[in-house]
Amino acid sequence: MPNLSLKKNEMPAQAPDVRNKNFDEVTLGYTEETAIDEAKRCLNCKTKPCVSGCPVMIDIPAFIERVAEGKFEEAFEIISKSSSLPAVCGRVCPQESQCEQRCVRGKKGEPVAIGRLERFVADYHNAHTEIKEQKIEKNGHKVAIIGSGPAGLTCAGDLARLGYDVTVYEALHVAGGVLVYGIPEFRLPKSIVSREIAGLAAMGVKIETNMVIGRILSIDELMTDMGFEAVFIASGAGLPKFMRIPGENLKGVYSANEFLTRINLMKSYKDNSATPIMHAHRVAVVGGGNVAMDAARCAKRLGAEVYIVYRRGESELPARAEEIEHAKEEGIIFKLLTNPVEILGYENKEDRRDPQNGFVRAMRCVEMELGEPDESGRCRPVEKAGSEFEIELDCVIMALGTSPNPLIKSTTEGLETERWGGIIADSDGLTSRTGIYAGGDAVTGAATVILAMGAGKKAAAAIDKYIKEKEGV
């Protein structure tokens, strides 16, 4: 029988006062019974509005129908035709603003929990199958991919299925890009990322780590000396932004990128980690996006009292509603309509050996109010006169966004970029250089995992078409 409930099945999770002290995954996933019950809420619309909201065009009604029938492996096969990273997407995609936003059930209640069902299907498959080497006939063509984040891995998977000899070059010592250095373990366990990458390796994708393209090898060397017929640049956006206010060079001020990389990739929260992290008492995270929520929730797990400082109001917070809710439940304090103007430090100029010298002691802020809408359509925050105040702190984390690293641009002749650093590419990912494609955050600036995956899929299709046309196929 169909499930006519107006509400989604609840996602089981660790209690807030337990999870804010550990790095284990917060949400626990649906059971088989719950997944089937939730799947029966789907109306299986003929027009499939949910599919149009998915950047990788998963046949959502078809996979949900299989879940409702208890045919979980068939559901996984349907998802896998479009997505190379279903266990990842089921956890970190903003479904509420994409597929679920267009779900018909959402007009008179809550939409079907598409993301939770995708996660269930992927987890079920991973728990019941082993990764096996796949025999895919090679077509004799080589493609290089720079970066092993979601755009690069998606492009690699699609090209490998078509028979291409694919090599992924990753600058860090572990593959996964932002999936391993940017997203905390409690939101995306790294064992899941490792398994997804192992699945690509089973298809023949080669991954070379510690390879900084632009230093060890240039893109031109990849194409002229190493025989790659096309290159896909998926190097992400790892260059942090700062406010350029006094005091940002004090000890105890981190970019969110550095803070999260130390925790997520280097496991600095563990006692035996070789990469230290500051165990602060009071932390302010400046920003309101998902990265800000991640940084704040990590700092809370390290034992700090944590503030989110954001210059607009709650309705303007760009983070996912679920992440904001989880942060509040875990005890994060939100200082909204607040803007920092200076970071203050201890400076005992008489004694440079003073252990507090040069460290953060407070942040000077001003209260804001919302004025007229700006070019983005959001109300512009305006400073309230005479509203200055201080927050006592010993750590500040700047989570203000990122831009692409200029290394690729500066070492690749003829590659056109935007003034802010993004690589200029058309809708298929083609850049100003023949045979060189780009996608994901390297083109758009910091965005979502699923949008990067969509760019990787488009680029793979375009590269395949380009090479076939070049060969006269």
Image: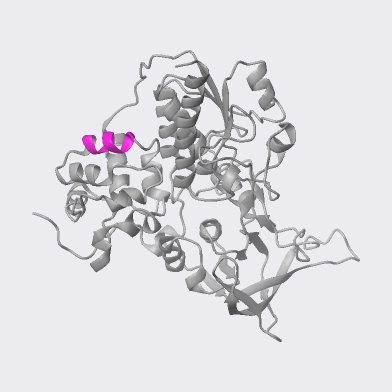
Tell me which corner region of the image, top left, top right, bottom left or bottom right, holds residue 146. Answer: top right
Residue nearer the viewer, 386 or 11: 386
Above or below: residue 66 compared with residue 35: above
| Magenta region, main secondary structure | helix
Q: Is residue 41 part of the magenta span, yes or no?
A: no
* Colour scheme of the rendered structure: one colour
Q: Residue at x 65, y 78 (%)?
A: 382
Q: Is residue 153 left or right of residue 421?
A: left
Q: Residue furthest bottom?
A: 386
Above or below: residue 440 compared with residue 167: below
Q: Is residue 464 left or right of residue 2?
A: right
Q: Residue at x 51, y 37 (%)?
A: 428
Q: Is residue 251 visible?
A: yes
- The percent coordinates of residue 164 (x first, y second) are 46, 20
Q: Is residue 165 visible?
A: no
- The percent coordinates of residue 284 (x first, y second) are 62, 66
- The percent coordinates of residue 302 (x first, y second) are 55, 57
The N terminus sits in image quarter: bottom left
Q: Specify start and end residues of the magenta stretch as a single range.
A: 74-81
Above or below: residue 401 compared with residue 80: below
Residue nearer the viewer, 115 or 364: 115
Tell me which corner region of the image, top left, top right, bottom left or bottom right, holds residue 218. Answer: top right
Q: Residue at x 44, y 16 (%)?
A: 473
Q: Residue at x 55, y 59 (%)?
A: 292
Q: Residue furthest right?
A: 350
Residue nearer the viewer, 415 or 313: 415
- The percent coordinates of residue 379 (x first, y second) are 56, 74
Residue nearer the viewer, 300 or 91: 91
